[in-house]
Image (cartoon, helix red, strand yellow):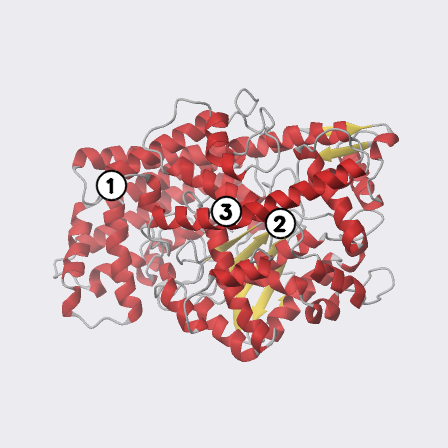
Amino acid sequence: MTKTRYLIAAAVVSAAVLTTGCKSMKNENPLLAEWNTPHTTVPFNSIKLEHYLPAVDTLVNVTLANIDAITANADEPTFENTIAPYEHASDRLNLVCGVLFNLNSAETSDSLQEIAMQVNEKVTEMSNNIHHNEKLFARIKSVYDKRGENNYDVDDAMLLENTYKEFARGGALLSKEDKDSLGKINKELGALSLDFEKNLLAATNDYTLHLTDSSQLEGLPDYVVTAMAEDARAKGVEGWVVTLHAPSYGPFMQFAKDRSLRKELYTAYNSRCVEGSAHDNTAVLKRIVELRARKAELLGYNTYADYVLEERMAKNRETVEDFLGELLDKSLPYGRANVAEVAEYAAAHGQSESLEPWDFSYWSEKLKNERYALNDSMLKPYFKLDNVRDALFMLAGKLYGLSFVRNNDIQTWNPDVEAYEVLDADSSYLAVLYLDFFPRPSKRGGAWMNPMKELTFMEGVDGRPHITVVTNITKPTSQSPSLLTFDEVTTLLHEFGHALHGIFANGKYTSLSGTNVAWDFVELPSQIMENWATESDFLSLWAKDYRDGSVIPDSLVNKIIDSRNYLSGYASCRQLSFGINDMAWHTLTAVPQESVESFERAATAKTALLPVVEGCYFSPSFSHIFAGGYAAGYYSYKWAEVLEADAFSLFKEKGIYDRETANAFRKLLSEGGRRPADDVYVEFRGRKPSVDALLEKSGLKE
């Protein structure tokens, strides 16, 4: 999931200012005109690339005019004439940037990437100017300093607190010279993040493994071979093609018997953007780390992690490092046992060489199949995409009373994208949901949720959220519909959880609603949804063989449940390695002289369970922390696992469809960031979360 605070933290224009601004705008630019579309959705069919830069220039000026109106007010600063108008300073600009940056991830091009770079520069410069506006900060500080004299409600108090912190943490208390330095750092960081993502997409798209000998297909299920043949046809070549996109790469590594090809593919995937490659990200990475460290120092923090974690549930890096270390200590014995078990199995079944990273998926899949008589080929017929999507909607209906109505009048950015109106239990409109399932060269890898438009509070405007869920799951072929792996099913449940968080956005202020919560809380709504994937009372309702409509048998459901903790120690160590690597980069005070590869090796040495492969390392393709919002925050996936395991234990106790529990959880989701995440969770659960629930759920508890 990627959060979308593209602009200043409180990024919405007041109704009065927007109306005045729009009257002077040229309506031939659809980004500046009123949208007479269902629920004021984006008119994608009318928007052209040449519309973005003029629209952003106009809206930056509107935003700055709004700020000038606040600072020109001769009255004594109050919440009503300073804090509230600032919260409403750039709504249309935020919406336009939401459209642009969503498309830059899901439907990009060289031209759009260049536009995104220019827009990033313009918006970053605007944001720096606003945060360093001494008159504006003086008014904000005046209101903040007198906060004890007013009886603010919960929302107003939190907005005031956040607004003051936003400016203080944005450099408002710095000298003129340091403000200028910080502004340059922020501008360069924005450009570097886009460069990082651009390089990674290019490296992923550049590589293909082209096969023409059918003997090289040994071990691959029919569905994988068919997809490879269709990829070859799409590229205009004979035979079969494997790419580095997940639906192609993952199954090949799981099933291909040809060890040399697995090695080649593994090496290609894990050397994307490494030093000396065509799309080398290592210099970009080091510069990002250097600038983040300098930014933290300017703002009075020892490291970038200290700066980031101050506003998270964890509060400080010592807590995070202790948390990751404790989980690693508990996971390592199980992880080592998992790898030893797979190595023994491989040796017993004919592999004379030692187990290498490109062997692990292949042999672990075979061991899983032997132990549980379960593999993706057996499950995929029951996981037709249409059925999975409808199952998500059904689950939201059973838990929260929601319904999802396809609306083909809502324009989308690609013909594959589906648009739905989300209705509440009383049939009132809640949100628009866009679903974009399949990989394409214009889309970055992975899966994510974004609000295309966040909850807004402008009078007379349809202000409910517009949510996007973007994935890269198995495409349909000429021989079968889109059939998902079990991992893809859980991925959809995960992202749908983020979507529900956005759909249930509520409150008085945009910046305190929806997914605008502490970053180490934001994965709770998504990860808890994955639990239903291993619940028989859920699977039995919808998982039907696409060929004859037969319901998934209890025996197969039981195998899914029995195998859910297969290799859980290995999986935990792998996830912890990402969090530990992230913290290592962001607790630096200076860029290391050693190579990125050497630094990563040292940082993650304790987590390593398989042999090191020279030239293969993941930092240059670690987009979550270098092109996304997870810098010094990747630990939050494990942090949220503790929360979700503890939270789901209440559903297990009360019933997985229990409405009372679901309503309490919906309240948690709708709270947004108006109250501290710790308080919101304790209110839901009745106590603080316990790590024991995660250890027990994962089979990592003695």
The residue under label 2 is 471
The kind of residue tagged 2 is Thr
Q: Position of residue 594 (x, y in %)?
A: 43, 22
Q: Is residue 199 left or right of residue 81?
A: right
Residue 223 visible? The answer is yes
Q: Secondary structure at mark 2?
A: loop
Q: Position of residue 583 (x, y in %)?
A: 41, 41
The crowding category of the residue bearing disc 3, from other C-alpha atoms within 10 Å (few below 14, some 14 to 19, many at least 20), is: many
Residue nearer the viewer, 81 or 655 = 655
Q: Secondary structure at mark 3?
A: helix
Q: Quadrant of residue 515?
A: bottom left
Disc 3 and disc 1: Cα gap in Å? Answer: 32 Å
Q: Secondary structure at mark 1?
A: loop
The residue under label 1 is 299
Q: In front: mark 1 or mark 2?
A: 1
Residue 410 visible? The answer is no
Q: Is residue 79 above or below residue 251?
A: below
The crowding category of the residue bearing disc 2, from other C-alpha atoms within 10 Å (few below 14, some 14 to 19, many at least 20), is: many
Disc 2 and disc 3: Cα gap in Å? Answer: 29 Å
The residue under label 3 is 328
Residue nearer the viewer, 188 or 630 = 630
Q: Position of residue 39 (x, y in %)?
A: 52, 64
Q: Residue placed at 46% from the left, 23% from the top?
A: 595
Give the mark, 2 or 3, whose residue is nearer the N terminus: 3
Q: Is residue 241 left or right of residue 628?
A: right
